[in-house]
Image: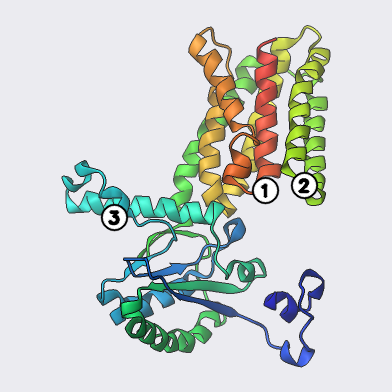
Amino acid sequence: AFLDAYSGRSSYSVMKALPQTYTTSTIRNLLVLDVATNEGQQRNELLLLPQGRRGFLPNMDFFFLAMTVYSNSNIIHRGVFFGVHPYAPSSTILSKFSWVSSLSPFFRQWIADLFDMFNFVRTLAIGPYSAHASSLDQGIDALTVQLRVSSDMEQTLIHEFTKRLEGIIRALSNLHERLHHSLTQYLLPSPFKFVSQSEYIIPVILALVPLVIRAVSLLLFEMDDTLNASTFPIIIICFGVTAVLEFVTDKITDLSRIHAALALLYVSAPAVARKLIEGKEKALFQSLHFLTCLLAIYLLIPLAIGHVSLGYPSVLFWSCLVAILPHRSSYSVHKLLWPVILLLAWPPVIAVPQVFGYYSPYMILVYFPLHFMSYLLWVFQNR
């Protein structure tokens, strides 16, 4: 609400726009302090939370500035947990597995960092998002520093916490000097380590290879000289339904009505398929499979570059579902596995609202088209 009032977008907020004399300066950085006392919490914790919606992250130098200031304070030396996500720390979870303690310190630390990086990605993908997320949406570098302390250490820790803020505020102006270079796409296994985009993008590219190989093999060895003409109405229907879904989800908040419409669409798809096949099942299946592979590559590459927390699991899942499963096989396991995965992946079953609370742009523009096309592949294969 404050940012809406500051920027003059009062129509989106219950607050009125602030006078122009108060809003002539540009907000370059925003540091959100979230301090509270939890009586029943045994563990004191200091969390640096950079995650924003849609994969937005602040300037990495902003995060490491806060990390450096607080890692050198007496707060950390008093046994306060220092983390980058709001979920349970890796030490709590891994302590339940006895075999982890038998590993060398290097591998124990590697597993702990991997677990914490997974939780960092989980927060970036589905939340919970801290108060600074709205600032990132408006292009303002922002970070939430969250302190949770027990009542017996409240006075000492909060005093040290507040005193260290001066070091952060004094250094903020240096983060926006001319031609300053930093990263805004990164992953954090811990407050002291980061994985840059140039490193995590390599396994994403490798995971896309099955889609490329499958598309090339279909084009060179399995398809006829031209695409089957019946596939183009199917593509148009898929894009048309996606556009309608994008419009409807902005107007309708009742998920049950949206799910009912999706159920009607998926039930009516086989009837439309019968009219389009016209005795060319094999050619239509191959053409549709080729276009689905191209669509997956087209959608997943920019997603992986801009929002790796959603891009990486999406690439792994859709590469298997689109490139590997859709081939004609006589094995009963394959015939059973594909429809079961499609059913579980249908948006109303698990994705919405169990994982995503609403139909986000990712669900509408990436997830739904790929699932609908994969479903049509299964329909045409069984004709």
Q: Secondary structure at mark 1?
A: loop
Image quarter (top left, top right, bottom left or bottom right) of the N terminus: bottom right
- Comparing 236 with 189, the one in front is 189
Q: Earlier in the sequence, mark 3 or mark 1?
A: 3
> Quadrant of the rendered structure where residue 147 is?
bottom left
Q: Is residue 234 found left or right of 188 in the rendered image?
A: right
Q: Is residue 71 found left or right of 249 in the rendered image?
A: left
As measured in the structure, the alpha-carbon distance from the residue carrying label 1 to the one carrying label 2 is: 9 Å
Q: Which residue is mark 1?
A: 358
As measured in the structure, the alpha-carbon distance from the residue carrying label 3 to the one carrying label 1 is: 32 Å
Disc 3 + disc 2, Cβ < 8 Å = no
10 Å crowding of disc 1: few (<14), some (14-19), many (20+): some
Disc 1 + disc 2, Cβ < 8 Å = yes
- Comparing 308 with 247, the one in front is 247
Kind of residue at disc 3: Ser
Q: Which residue is mark 3?
A: 91
